[in-house]
Image (cartoon, rainbow, N blue to C red):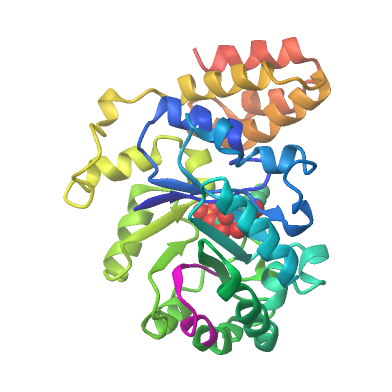
Amino acid sequence: MLILAPMQGLTELLFRRVFHRCYPGAFDYAVSPFLSITHGNLRDAGKKVEDVLPEFNSDSIPVVPQLLGHEADGFVDLANRLNDLGYSELNWNMGCPMRRVAAKHRGSGILPYPDEVRGILDSVVPRLKATLSVKVRLGYLSPDEIDAIIPILNDYPLSSVTVHPRTGKQMYSGQVNLDKFAEILPEIKHKVIYNGDVCSVYDYRKIRLKFPQVKDVMIGRGALYNPLLPTMIRAEMPEDFASEGPHKISDSLSSQTFINALINDILELDISNQAKIRKIKEYWCLLSKSIPGTEENKRKVLHASDLDAILRLISEMTK
Ligand SMILES: Cc1cc2nc3c(=O)[nH]c(=O)nc-3n(C[C@H](O)[C@H](O)[C@H](O)COP(=O)(O)O)c2cc1C
């Protein structure tokens, strides 16, 4: 399976809907950007929870909501409300590297504390109506922290363990630690999903060849550097993906078309022009890598401050 990674501010509902419209079936499912368990009250939680409300997700990539936090009662409360909405799987974020999150033993900040991980799973799992999957890093400070976490994860009925083989301290840069991933893979008794730096068909093939037992790959930034990537992977690997409809590159919409569709949907949002500009620029930083044009011209979009000027520059490059 190919899974779209959760990326706060990027792979949110708007992106997933446009992606689904342009490349239906390219991703099997997405994990949502995290919902903090402080958003437990669905009715009052506002925008954050809207991201996974089924009424907005029916024409989108199927989504597994992700929860961030370590307070068991709040976790169960939000998880069971999401289950009532129809979600049969929920994902626990044990990977977020942001300092203000990790400092409170949330995200990857919980990985140095195996007793806390066990305490939460002990309290949460028996009370959940949905199944739980987790997304982890190798550790917060050290890649060996995972060694004490795996036997704990093995004690609970998790539907999958997604591993991003970096530490929290590494954030999103530096090498992925494939040696450590190889070391821990046989120790994990659950289905393992690989995640990290798959930005081309070559990267994908490298992971599948090196770890043939790993059948599922989660892709984040690669899908923004090149929105055609999951389609290209499916076209290259027909024996793995026999089921879903045509996945030929020639049948697929171009990145230019995708970028224009995404921008059109941003322009329709009920937000200020400044907020639209911020959003367009955030996506442009990543998506502009997928189209021809000089870096200098692409940078002009980031330097412009007027919405009409930005749209004019982009439309010239995405004709
Ligand atoms: C801007 C940004 C936001 C992210 N937000 C989340 C998140 O909400 N939950 C999560 O589990 N991971 C989050 N991640 C991590 C990604 O899901 C993924 O693990 C990471 O980008 C490595 O995969 P990639 O190399 O395919 O992008 C985020 C990453 C970035 C760059």
Q: Is residue 283 above or below residue 261?
A: below
Q: Left or right? Give the position of 190 relative to 315.
A: left
Image point (56%, 32%), residue name: 55
Task: Provide residue 273's location: percent of width, then percent of height.
Answer: 80, 18
Splitting the image into four quadrants, where does ligand 1 fall? bottom right
Is there any visible trace of residue 263 in the rendered image? yes
Q: Is residue 315 above or below residue 258?
A: above
Task: Provide residue 13's location: percent of width, then percent of height.
Answer: 59, 35
Q: Nearer the viewer, residue 203 or 85?
A: 85
Q: Left or right? Give the position of 159 relative to 306.
A: left
Task: Provide residue 36's location: percent of width, then percent of height.
Answer: 73, 56
Q: Nearer the viewer, residue 62 or 318?
A: 62
Image point (51%, 27%), residue name: 18
Count of numbered badges drawn on the protein: 0
Image point (60%, 16%), residue name: 264
Which region is colored magenta? 152-165
Is there any visible trace of residue 97 in the rendered image? no
Task: Provide residue 86's location: percent of width, then percent of height.
Answer: 51, 47
> Can residue 84 be found in the magenta stretch?
no
Image point (30%, 57%), residue name: 205
Q: Is residue 245 above or below residue 203?
A: above
Q: Is residue 239 above or below residue 212?
A: above
> Can residue 158 be found in the magenta stretch?
yes
Give the quarter of the image for residue 85: top right
